[in-house]
Image (spheres, rainbow, N blue to C red):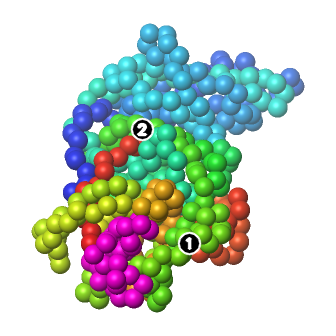
């Protein structure tokens, strides 16, 4: 299913201009930091440059300090109101908690403290842009708030149009993920730039809280676009559940907390419409839905189904198929979906969560990258190579290879895609 069919383009006029690289530090403030005996105190440079105009509303307060460290940042608007924010972990900048206002003037004061306790204050005043001729691209955050997700749930952001390679680092720097307890990971881009995924080297630990911010509003992206919105969401990771489907045996094995709890006969895609083999993630769940494949290749049918769980954008689901119960466990007769009995499908709906891993093996075709949330369909080394920013070298899986299901591991909202399947 093409991304263009899932996203609705929004045209938003947001002022933007490249962030100025110059710094501003008052000489008298540098002198005030001089240490006894003539030793130099800390020096601090601040961006945006003093008196800069047309600064993007996505601007951060950049800081470069020598002979000291940043001990405080204060940003106020032209009405004297303080702007909330926090520093990046690497200390390279201070990030406002929300986009700045368009056409507003802001003053930043950055205090640096040296080893001898001397302080230096760097100041800059800048004005944000009021309009732009650039079009706002559409981004979709597939990580809703106040949910309970499975241990394989990646944070996914999709883009229309796709992000060009030269702009991906800037976009990635504006995508923030925090986990409690800490479980660091990295982002990884699809080759075409249409989606980027975030995950840790190992599956999420049950009980982890994940907070996400996609802070793209007003961000200059490439030569033609700006980001469309600033989105936040926080959700939890639930129990460990994983489904393994083996085409050779026509059986689904259901694991919970690493323990096999049930085997279920399945019928997969027939040879002309085979199921995909690979590591997928449950994307959405429907008690009832309609598969309408009119206009799709090898489609042309309309059928109402119950207890359907989406695995791919291309229309592969696990769902109740009472019409094929005689074939389940023996013969593949579906259009690519995993058919199970009505009783089994109803039971699965009460066990699984969006974000649970589903591994299918032994079918005629491999899972295509990006056909669903395919963040786990590669090993960690390959996944990390997809980052547009450096990945800490010590970030790696706890074991040499990932287990076949997350149960063996110790520990924006988005529009719903239209269903299709078989």
Query: Which numbered disc, 1 or 2, marks the residue closer to the eye?
Result: 1
Q: Give x and y (percent) for residue 363.
A: 40, 86
Please give the label number shown on residue 32. Answer: none
Q: Are marks 1 and 2 in contact (CB under 8 Å)?
A: no
Residue highlighted by disc 2: 231
Q: Nearer the viewer, residue 406 or 223?
A: 406
**Residue at 69% over, 75% down:** 400
Residue density around tag 2, few if under 14, some if 14–19, many if 20 or more, within 10 Å: some
Horizontal side of 109 relative to 273 (left or right) equals right
Res. 215 visible in picture: no
Q: Nearer the viewer, residue 43 or 175?
A: 175
Q: Give x and y (percent) for residue 218.
A: 35, 36
Measure the C-alpha gap from mark 1 to mark 2: 39 Å
Res. 233 visible in picture: yes
Image quadrant occupied by the C terminus: bottom left
Q: Give x and y (percent) for residue 11.
A: 21, 39
Identify the element where label 1 is drawn. strand
**Residue at 33% over, 21% down:** 103
> Can you say whether 419 is above or below 255 in the image?
above
Residue density around tag 1, few if under 14, some if 14–19, many if 20 or more, within 10 Å: few
> Can you say whether 402 is above or below 108 in the image?
below
Please give the label number shown on residue 262. Answer: 1
Q: Residue furthest right?
A: 37
**Residue at 84% over, 27% down:** 116
Tell whether position 332 is magenta. yes
Identify the element where label 2 is drawn. strand
> Can you say whether 226 is above or below 113 in the image?
below
Residue range (magenta): 316-345
């Amino acid at each position: 299913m093409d991304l263009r069919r899932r996203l609705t383009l929004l045209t938003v006029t947001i002022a933007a201009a490249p962030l100025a690289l110059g710094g501003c530090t008052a000489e008298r403030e540098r002198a005030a930091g001089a240490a006894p005996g003539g030793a130099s105190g800390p020096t601090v440079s601040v961006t945006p440059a003093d008196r800069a105009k047309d600064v993007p509303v996505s601007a951060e307060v950049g800081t470069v300090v020598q002979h000291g460290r940043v001990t405080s940042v204060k940003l106020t608007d032209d009405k004297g109101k303080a702007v909330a924010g926090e520093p990046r972990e690497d200390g390279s900048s201070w990030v406002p908690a929300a986009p700045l206002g368009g056409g507003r003037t802001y003053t930043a004061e950055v205090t640096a403290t040296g080893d001898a306790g001397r302080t230096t204050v760097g100041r800059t005043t800048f004005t944000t842009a009021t309009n732009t001729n650039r079009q706002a691209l559409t981004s979709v955050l597939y990580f809703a708030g106040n949910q309970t997700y499975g241990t394989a749930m990646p944070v996914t952001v999709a883009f229309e149009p796709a992000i060009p390679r030269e702009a991906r680092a800037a976009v990635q720097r504006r995508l923030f993920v925090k986990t409690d307890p800490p479980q660091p990971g990295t982002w990884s881009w699809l080759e075409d730039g249409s989606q980027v995924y975030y995950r840790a080297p190992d599956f999420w630990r049950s009980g982890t809280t994940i907070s996400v911010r996609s802070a793209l509003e007003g961000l200059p992206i490439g030569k033609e676009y700006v980001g469309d919105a600033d989105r936040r969401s926080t959700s939890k990771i639930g129990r460990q559940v994983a489904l393994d489907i083996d085409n050779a045996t026509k059986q689904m094995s259901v694991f919970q907390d690493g323990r096999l709890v049930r085997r279920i006969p399945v019928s997969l895609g027939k040879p002309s419409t085979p199921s995909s083999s690979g590591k997928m993630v449950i994307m959405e769940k429907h008690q009832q839905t309609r598969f309408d494949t009119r206009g799709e290749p090898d489609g042309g049918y309309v059928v109402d189904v119950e207890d359907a769980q989406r695995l791919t954008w291309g229309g592969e689901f696990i769902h109740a198929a009472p019409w094929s119960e005689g074939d389940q466990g023996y013969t593949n007769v579906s259009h690519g979906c995993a058919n199970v009995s009505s009783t089994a499908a109803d039971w699965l709906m009460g066990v699984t969560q969006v974000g649970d891993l589903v591994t299918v093996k032994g079918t005629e075709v491999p899972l295509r990258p990006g056909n669903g949330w395919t963040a786990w369909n590669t090993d960690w080394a390959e996944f990390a190579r997809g980052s547009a920013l450096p990945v800490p070298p010590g970030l790696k899986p706890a074991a040499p290879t990932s287990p076949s299901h997350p149960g063996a591991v110790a520990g924006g909202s988005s529009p719903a895609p239209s269903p299709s399947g078989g």
